[in-house]
Image: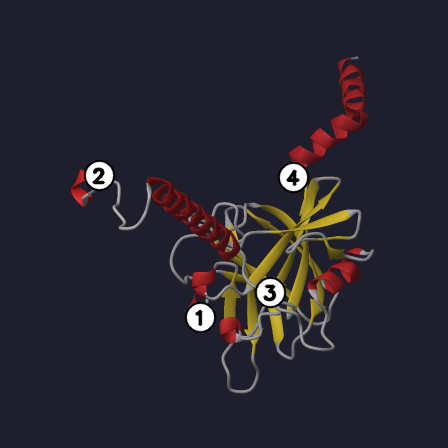
């Protein structure tokens, strides 16, 4: 007769089980643990992306807005990305543990912004909030574009990391509400902006930003305001591009003439 204490450390005695039966139980448990771990991992990956719902009837979706703004016909390339065959819209993460790789904060640089869609009754301005520190410090908001008319453009140079923002004019006796790309700046720590990297031939040339203007993001269609950003090269980068296209010879010729 076998007793529980006769088993080695870490082994569980189960009445009526043979060694083969117990081994099968252990294998099944290991498989369950692996399956649970995979589900948790998949859930964590999904949690990095804010859910975007289909828009209500008569409103444009992300793919339709991208098609109108950039040309061609954007269709689903993955469950989150779109492509028109030439341009690839790669969905950015909305949250990560340390915010690296997410769309909360944006690097210093020069950006050309164009208002490309408005699917909302409210009026808005689109702009920036400088810095990444401090909870809810929105006093540095700088407006760039009005949401009406669609098609307005502006260029902004930021010399420090910053956040994109949308100021919503709710009209009447209601005060404006400012939402930023950092979720915890917003009421209920809700994410009011989803974004895509825009790549052509694998090279990044801009971004597409989509905003939700309803408090707490009740409908989650993220099409109330859409802005296309184009990266503007710095003078140094432009000069490097020039030399790469034969400008080096032009510069060398200029130096020779100046030495004569």
Where does label 1 land, which residue?
187
Which residue does the image show at 40% across and 53% down from the upper left?
133
Quadrant in the picture for residue 76: bottom right
Q: CA distance from mark 3 to mark 2?
A: 54 Å
Q: Earlier in the sequence, mark 1 or mark 4?
A: 1
Q: Secondary structure at mark 1?
A: helix
Outermost left residue: 5
Q: CA distance from mark 3 to mark 1?
A: 18 Å
- Judge the density around disc 3: few (<14), some (14-19), many (≥20) Cα neighbours within 10 Å: some
Asked if labels 4 and 1 touch by Cβ distance under 8 angstroms, the answer is no
- Judge the density around disc 2: few (<14), some (14-19), many (≥20) Cα neighbours within 10 Å: few
Which colour scheme appears in the figure? secondary structure
Outermost bottom residue: 172
At which x and y percent is residue 100?
48, 45
Q: Earlier in the sequence, mark 4 or mark 3?
A: 3
- Judge the density around disc 1: few (<14), some (14-19), many (≥20) Cα neighbours within 10 Å: some
Q: CA distance from mark 1 to mark 4?
A: 36 Å
Where does label 3 land, which residue?
52
Where does label 2 land, which residue?
7
Q: CA distance from mark 4 to mark 2?
A: 71 Å
The answer to whether residue 112 is seen in the rendering is: yes
Quadrant in the picture for residue 117: bottom right
On screen, residue 121 versus residue 22, left or right, reads: right
Outermost top residue: 260
Front residue of this view, candidates 25 and 18? 18
Where does label 4 land, which residue?
234
Q: Earlier in the sequence, mark 3 or mark 2?
A: 2
Which residue does the image show at 37% across and 47% down from the upper left?
25
Q: Quadrant of the N terminus?
A: top left
């Amino acid at each position: 007769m076998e007793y529980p204490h006769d088993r080695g450390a870490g082994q569980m005695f189960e009445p009526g089980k043979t060694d083969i039966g117990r081994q099968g139980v252990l294998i099944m448990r290991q498989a369950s643990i692996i399956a649970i771990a995979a589900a948790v991992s998949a859930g964590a990956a999904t949690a990095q992306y804010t859910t975007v719902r289909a828009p209500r009837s008569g409103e444009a979706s992300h793919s339709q807005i991208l098609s109108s703004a950039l040309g061609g016909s954007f269709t689903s390339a993955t469950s989150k990305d779109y492509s028109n065959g030439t341009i690839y819209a790669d969905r950015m993460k909305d949250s990560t543990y340390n915010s690296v790789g997410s769309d909360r904060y944006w690097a210093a640089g020069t950006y050309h912004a164009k208002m490309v869609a408005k699917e909302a009754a409210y009026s808005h301005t689109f702009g920036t909030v400088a810095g990444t520190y401090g909870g809810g410090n929105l006093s540095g908001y700088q407006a760039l574009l009005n949401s009406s008319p669609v098609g307005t453009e502006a260029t902004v140079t930021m010399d420090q990391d910053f956040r994109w923002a949308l100021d919503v004019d709710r009209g009447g006796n209601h005060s404006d509400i400012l939402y930023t790309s950092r979720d915890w700046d917003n009421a209920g720590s809700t994410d009011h902006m989803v974004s895509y990297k825009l790549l052509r031939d694998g090279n990044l040339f801009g971004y597409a930003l989509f905003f939700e203007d309803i408090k707490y993001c009740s409908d989650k269609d993220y099409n109330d305001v859409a802005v296309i950003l184009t990266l503007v090269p710095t003078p140094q980068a432009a000069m490097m591009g020039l030399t790469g296209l034969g400008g080096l010879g032009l510069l060398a010729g200029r130096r020779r003439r100046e030495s004569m």
